[in-house]
Amino acid sequence: MSEQKAFNVAVVGITGAVGQQIIRLLEERNFPVGELKLLASARSAGKKIQFKDREITVEEATPDSFAGVQIAFFSAGGDISKELVPAAVKAGAVCIDNTNAFRMDPETPLVVPEVNIGEADKNKGIIANPNCSTIQMVATLKPLYDRYGIDKIIVSTYQAVSGAGARAIEELKRQSTEAVSGNPVNPDILPVSSLPVKHQIAFNAIPQIDKFLDNGFTNEEMKMIRETKKIMGDESLKVTATCVRIPVYYGHSESVYVELKSDFDIEEVKELLANSPGIVLEDEPAAQRYPLATNAAGKLDTFVGRVRRDLENPRALNLWIVSDNLLKGAAWNAVQIGEYLVQQQN
Ligand code: NAP
Ligand code: 3JN
């Protein structure tokens, strides 16, 4: 970003997988940071973190942490957001919240910049960042929604372990070594839920992300269903989801079947996707070129390929969508919203 008025910024959850990406992006994007508060739990208080030429000491996040803060990024879990976001708003900050705490609150905009950045203008101090799996799907489907209308979406996800935090990344490393060396594999973290039952993630696929709800869907699946409707501003949209954890470190992949409301030309669909902001079309079956988590990791864009008309329903498409879950799925979407706020005030 070019030189602009500086903003006092706080990052809550700075020591986590998402918080680390947020600070890296603030640095790389030359976000106009004035004072910077780096906050985490009491366990991390006193740790030193480098931001550009400053060495900043991590402080425990408390309701008193936000005096003078103008923009606060939250990624320390829903309970911390429920407790501290209201205090930050009271202190005058606009909070960009990566958690589930306020996403479905009718007063809180749920924003994916490529889809509905204008909603951010309606904020009353909180802007919610959607779930990672939702973000990459709606960012890709929005141009199709605008051009053809969408009736139904059926999505199956293949989600990286980093979506479950820094400890889940370590778990996959440890289990992979245990399995390859022929030792017993000891599951400890996944699936994340309050039950003590854990499953092996190395060389496996776990069809559960987050806890089960009474309707048989998991919380992650219900987030995708509800958030997609809210972001698209269309409660009539039919959405169903199956969310699966796979042994990949970074990058969520999604197989998406989408029924459009009008006829389409498949080449026009590809052109539309290729020309959409934040979307990269990678679709050359003859060259075996399509999106891969290993290629998407570390990138800000969302990648789409395997674009093909359904054989049974001529108004339906099948797509393969991949993005870095910690970047576009969390930190980058949040920093993009931050950049928009900065732009609006300059
Ligand atoms: P993580 O790697 O486990 O990091 C958790 C962070 O929260 C750490 O900085 C931790 O600080 C901090 N924290 C924990 N308890 C705290 C407390 N009592 N007070 C203040 N800070 C506390 O998890 P992550 O992957 O970064 O995810 C963090 C949160 O971001 C998730 O819970 C979720 O709500 C959100 N998230 C959103 C998406 C998305 O799809 N948009 C994706 C992933 C995560 P310590 O190091 O001091 O414990
Ligand atoms: O597991 C994943 O791949 C994504 C996880 C996201 C997540 C993890 C813990 C809490 C969320 C989220 O952003 O939906 C939350 C939350 O809702 O706060």
Image (spheres, rainbow, N blue to C red):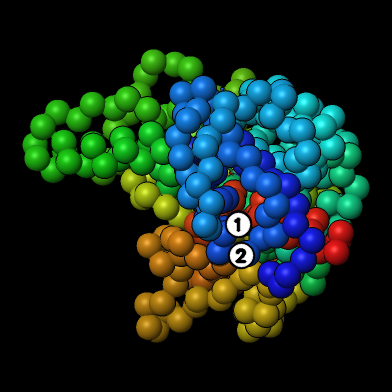
Crowd around label 2: few <14 · some 14–19 · many ≥20 (10 Å)? some
Residue drawn at 41 percent across, 67 percent down:
295
Q: Which residue is denoted by mark 1 in the rendering?
A: 26
Residue drawn at 39 percent across, 15 percent down:
196
Local SS, label 2 = loop
Q: Is residue 89 visible?
A: yes
Query: Where does residue 243 sit, x and y in percent of width and height?
Result: 51, 41
- In the image, taking residue 307 as reference, residue 94 lies left or right, namely right
Along the viewing direction, whichever of 133 and 41 lies nearer the viewer: 41
Along the viewing direction, whichever of 237 and 209 lies nearer the viewer: 209
Whether the residues at callouts 2 and 1 have beta carbons within 8 Å, the answer is yes
Q: Determine the residue located farthest toward the left in the rendered image.
A: 182
Q: Is residue 337 visible?
A: no
Name the image quarter holding the N terminus: bottom right
Along the viewing direction, whichever of 150 and 98 lies nearer the viewer: 98
Question: Looking at the image, is 290 positioned above or below residue 328?
Answer: below
**Label 1 is placed on what type of residue?**
Leu
Residue drawn at 50 percent across, 70 percent down:
306
